[in-house]
Image (cartoon, coloured by chain):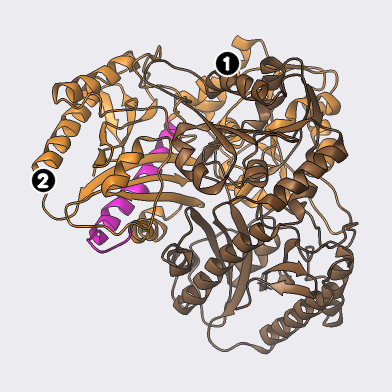
Chain colours: A brown, B orange
Amino acid sequence: MDDLERRERIREALTDFRLDGLVCVSQTDILLLTGYWPVMGASVVVFPTSQQVQVVLPEDEMEIASHSTSAHLIPYQPASLDGLSTPLEKLSPVLKSALAGVHLDKARLGIRRGLCMQPASYSSSLQLGQALESFLAKVAPDTKRIECDAELDLLKATKTSAELKLIRKSAAIAADAFTRGSHTIEAGQRESDVAAAFQHAFETSQVAAGTRRFYAFFFCMSGPNSAKASGAYAHTQQRVIENGDLVLVHANTCADGYWTDVTRTYVVGDESERQAGMRSAIEQARAAALRSIRPGARARDVDAAARGVMEQHGLGEAFRHSTGHGVGFVAANPNALPRIHPMSPDLLENGMTFNVEPAAYFDGYGGMRHCDMVAVADNGAQVLTDF
Amino acid sequence: MDDLERRERIREALTDFRLDGLVCVSQTDILLLTGYWPVMGASVVVFPTSQQVQVVLPEDEMEIASHSTSAHLIPYQPASLDGLSTPLEKLSPVLKSALAGVHLDKARLGIRRGLCMQPASYSSSLQLGQALESFLAKVAPDTKRIECDAELDLLKATKTSAELKLIRKSAAIAADAFTRGSHTIEAGQRESDVAAAFQHAFETSQVAAGTRRFYAFFFCMSGPNSAKASGAYAHTQQRVIENGDLVLVHANTCADGYWTDVTRTYVVGDESERQAGMRSAIEQARAAALRSIRPGARARDVDAAARGVMEQHGLGEAFRHSTGHGVGFVAANPNALPRIHPMSPDLLENGMTFNVEPAAYFDGYGGMRHCDMVAVADNGAQVLTDF
């Protein structure tokens, strides 16, 4: 992929920040800057204002990278049989020469200095960010390192056409898995069986054809457990599902680095009056939120639209969390832009992607949430998970 | 779990390092120090030399933590509807008071400063380590922060009886998944179908009963693709499996924070002479490595035992990587102790856990690997994945 639109935006941003370049090691930052999503976390990107973007990466990741970026790839060997070494020891000379090659060895370089949420890119990965600043000070002592965490986060908020296409594909795989997985829900199954069935539907999805790496985390929380889905994370247990239960299935899925955040809540058997009331309120809250989405709208107004409907139905207190947050480069980060939160200062822009997740939770009884992936377009909200 | 053995070892280590305490945010470090494996990465542990261990953690993780640790739990709310904030803003006052509560606000504190590989604990998690040093300097300016990365890594190498029990359980779940998943392999299936079948077998395993969080990453690489398994990571594709193929299935699985690293290689249909030769060499290399394992043995001698057999079979060059590395607190970290590598200075100790993974790879043809989880006991190697 050669995303000219993205490269142009970053170059404009570099001019605005008065930087000569960026040096990034966070896997999501590298995806943003190049289209390549590192596997093991041992890659470094050097992004100059005018010359070609340089990626220093483990030789093992050359094939994956060459399919996803037009940046210049410089392989190195983090480990070998000839000696024991840390990745930093092997990286050091390669990065030094990459910086010199694009005349950034005495430059003003933007780096990420603080916190960021990282999605799982493999069973484990290196967290190179922790060492970046001191490492860079050693490798390129004449550079000036300047924090640009907020600027990188802002760049991630608004997607390019190429990125939107990939996020749309990622959402389509998730939608297929939900549609096929949901047929398996029945009384007598454990939560873990239901989660496994959805996971299997995802992993065997024909919609994923052409995708190189796709992972998913599916969770099932049923009956009283579903009320706990209001927390920061979902948690599948071994509870056996009963007739009449609320069955909340939540997923964070990923295709080639682009994440989704999707939830549906099913009822086993006939829906009770209480459940039907919750569902109706949530559907109306969702519709109200979607109607309020357009370029220039205030994110807090989207939250207010959904929250207002929930309050009208007496479910204001049961709607415990914000209406949404940015999703795409990462799934479950409540601080990803735009924050669809009562106190949010964020304004919506064409190309932003986030989730819309009206919900109602009652401790001891259960929870219901409907979470969609949404993109902002000129004519309003585009729902990427319309199933 | 109250792991007195672990607490005692850490206290002894603190005395040796002349530290008053440890402050850790890495999820694997927190698992080591307390038995609690954080989900979202927004937890901090304060480990004093004599007073009770303090864990500052998101309120949402109280239930998980209270089941896994006897440390004192101090909940906080990283996010709320009342305002936008970063986790650090909310953490700050709570951590400050936790430090003062155990008289560590002016102390010599060990912290992790450099690189570490983190396993996936959720679809995404916060990498608090990056901010720890400057955060601590603000919250507790009178403390002295001392790097103890190497000391923490060393503590992780040798497991306590309680940890060994959990790693053994984790390996048993993986073994069950391999045993049940392997029946599904046949010509005509895609690699992704095979990986999905193993994953499903894992997620529905009855052996997992009693485990609170279990995740797995299963990968399938077949035919020529299996040769690429010599790299730092495995990668499932959509290749359709043919009769006569090598089918390499690799997994990193996790139960409540304790990881495994397991590989088996199957042949579809009749095994060819070449494949039988590879299998025989690998079996003998495995046996030689296992025979050489005992407390006090040199890790490099274990590598030499396996490598020598492979060389005798003319497969020395095809065995491209080291014979193993530490596994338990993390799966795929080649620098985890002990390093079963030709140049390793490490000595084996009772309670160490690592993988033994003799293999042969031929580009364009395929690869075969047999990777087991092993623990060092008084009388030699205990294989935790003996199936």
Q: CA distance from mark 2 to mark 1?
A: 53 Å
Examine the rendered structure and indicate whether residue B25 appears above or below residue B289.
Answer: below
Question: Residue at left 88%, top 71%?
Answer: A304
Examine the rendered structure and indicate whether residue B42 appears above or below residue B111.
Answer: below
Q: Which of the two marks, 2 or 1, is nearer to us in this view?
A: 2
- Range of residues picked out in magenta: B161-190
Residue holding disc 1: B13
| Helix, strand or loop for the magenta stretch, by majority | helix
Residue holding disc 2: B272
Disc 1 secondary structure class: helix
Question: Residue at left 74%, top 38%?
Answer: A115
- Residue B39 is left or right of residue B145, and the answer is left
Q: Is residue A356 visible?
A: no
Examine the rendered structure and indicate whether residue B185 appears above or below residue B255.
Answer: below
Tell me where residue B13 sits by quadrant. Answer: top right
Q: Whole-percent x and y of residue A61? A: 48, 38
Q: Is residue A296 visible?
A: yes
Q: Whole-percent x and y of residue B367? A: 26, 40
- Residue toward you, A161 or A101: A101
- Residue B269 is left or right of residue A229, and the answer is left
Circle 2/circle 1 CB separation < 8 Å: no
Q: Whole-percent x and y of residue B131? A: 75, 32
